[in-house]
């Protein structure tokens, strides 16, 4: 275990089983239909890579990068698009792939933005959902794990760009950021 991690919340095997389950559910729900997976960079990149391979059927992938203004530790709800999609969303089935839903403000902005481009349908798949933290009513059809209200890293999730490569999800030692 990494020295800055105080506890492993989800092991590699648990994540693997969870992502396969989500992939199977998506495969069943979209049987015979094409889906465009919109990955929110950078945190969701590993989740997306595994989720895409767990989905049977026709999948396309695109990326979006956003950043929240304001304090780094908390979402302000004001989101800036750093990298936009290359694909057209109009008339397509969209799944937004997120690493973690905390306040939900980033996702709220994103889904509103994508909805305005007239998709046929839009759903959200998030690997982690922080319990009781959501400040908005963003609906998430596919949820991997419910996560305690701690700062977590690994499997794509970072603190100051570090720890994304950890193969598990763990709680970051508060001493690293306080
Ligand atoms: P929200 O707008 O508050 O829902 O924040 C969502 C974004 O903040 C996520 O997509 C992550 O990039 C980041 N984030 C929130 N909580 C954590 C955490 O515990 N670890 C790492 N990143 C986090
Ligand atoms: Mg993110």
Image (tube, helix red, strand yellow):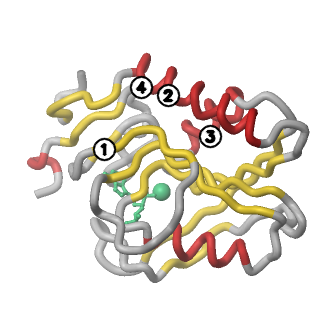
**Of the residues under marks 1 and 3, which one precedes in the sequence?**
3
Q: CA distance from mark 4 to mark 2?
A: 14 Å
Marks 4, 1: nearer the viewer = 1
Q: Which residue is mark 3?
A: 48
- Numbered disc 1: secondary structure: strand
- Numbered disc 3: secondary structure: helix
- Numbered disc 2: secondary structure: helix
Task: Give above or below for 144 relative to 133.
Answer: above
Query: Within 10 Å of the Cα at label 4, are there few (<14), some (14-19), or many (20+) other Cα atoms?
Result: some
**On residue 147, which mark appears?**
1
Query: Within 10 Å of the Cα at label 2, are there few (<14), some (14-19), or many (20+) other Cα atoms?
Result: some
Residue 115 appears in which quarter of the rendering? bottom right
Q: CA distance from mark 4 to mark 3?
A: 14 Å
Horizontal arrangement in the rendering, residue 128 relative to residue 2 (left or right): right
Residue 176 image offset from top left, x and y in percent: 15, 48
**Of the residues under marks 4 and 3, which one precedes in the sequence?**
3
Query: Within 10 Å of the Cα at label 3, are there few (<14), some (14-19), or many (20+) other Cα atoms?
Result: many
Which quadrant contains ligand 1? bottom left
**Of the residues under marks 4 and 1, which one precedes in the sequence?**
1
Quadrant containing the N terminus is top left
**Of the residues under marks 1 and 2, which one precedes in the sequence?**
2
Horizontal arrangement in the rendering, residue 111 relative to residue 4 (left or right): right
Marks 3, 2: nearer the viewer = 2
Q: CA distance from mark 3 to mark 2?
A: 13 Å
Q: Which residue is mark 4?
A: 167
**Residue closer to the observer: 24 or 178:** 24
Marks 4, 2: nearer the viewer = 2
**Residue closer to the observer: 167 or 102:** 102
**On residue 18, which mark appears?**
2
- Residue that extends furthest to the top in the rendered view of this protein: 13
């Amino acid at each position: 275990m990494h020295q800055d991690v105080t506890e492993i919340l989800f092991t590699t095997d648990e994540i693997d089983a969870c992502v396969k389950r989500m992939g199977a559910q998506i495969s069943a729900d979209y049987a015979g239909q094409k889906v465009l997976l919109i990955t929110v960079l950078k945190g969701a990149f590993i989740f997306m890579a595994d989720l895409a391979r767990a989905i049977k059927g026709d999948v396309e992938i695109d990326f979006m990068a956003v950043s929240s203004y304001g304090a780094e530790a908390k979402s302000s709800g004001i989101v800036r698009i750093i990298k936009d999609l290359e694909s057209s969303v109009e008339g397509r089935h969209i799944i937004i792939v997120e690493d973690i839903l905390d306040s939900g403000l980033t996702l709220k902005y994103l889904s509103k933005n994508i909805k305005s481009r007239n998709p046929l349908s839009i759903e959200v798949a998030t690997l982690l959902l922080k319990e009781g933290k959501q400040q908005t009513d963003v609906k998430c059809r596919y949820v991997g794990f419910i996560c305690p209200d701690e700062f977590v890293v690994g499997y794509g999730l970072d603190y100051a760009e570090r720890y994304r490569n950890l193969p598990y999800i763990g709680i970051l030692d508060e001493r690293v950021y306080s």
